[in-house]
Image: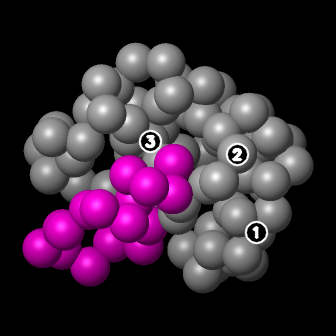
Amino acid sequence: MKKIIVACNSGLGTSLMIRLNVEALLKEWGLKAWVEHTDISSIDTFDADLIIGSSYIIESLQLAKDVEKIGVDDITDRHHLKTKLLESETVRQWLAG
């Protein structure tokens, strides 16, 4: 199963908002994925295919594993998130089937 982690400082508001929009877009595209939101200190506990968060969070991440990361500049703009996801190599592969 495809796995997406959405992260923010505390793992509450920002990441939940992004997660809900990610889940809506995945449904719109007919993709099934396990999506979880968490705080940045817990990211390494998940085996994710994709990590999403606000740009300043993503830029600060130093992860050992090679996982694609997407930073969003406007966490409330669903169109911006959609654009960023469609630019993602991982998501394009998923959409290609």
Q: Residue at x 60, y 25 (%)?
A: 17
Q: Which residue is drawn at 70% across and 45% down?
A: 74
Q: Give the range drawn in magenta.
A: 54-69
Marks 2 and 1, the one that precedes in the sequence: 2
Question: Mark 1 = which residue?
Answer: 86
SS at circle 3 = strand
The residues tagged by marks 3 and 2 sit, at their Cα atoms, a distance apart of 14 Å
> What x and y, as percent, mark residue 26?
71, 45
Residue 86 in view? yes
Please, what is the three-letter code of the amino acid marked with disc 2?
A: Asp
Question: Mark 3 = which residue?
Answer: 6
Circle on res. 74:
2
Q: How crowded is mark 1: few (under 14 residues within 10 Å), some or many (20 or more)?
A: few
Question: Front-most of 48 and 6?
Answer: 6
> In what quadrant of the picture does the C terminus appear?
bottom right
Q: Residue at x 65, y 53 (%)?
A: 73
Marks 1 and 3, the one that precedes in the sequence: 3
CB atoms at circles 3 and 2 under 8 Å apart? no
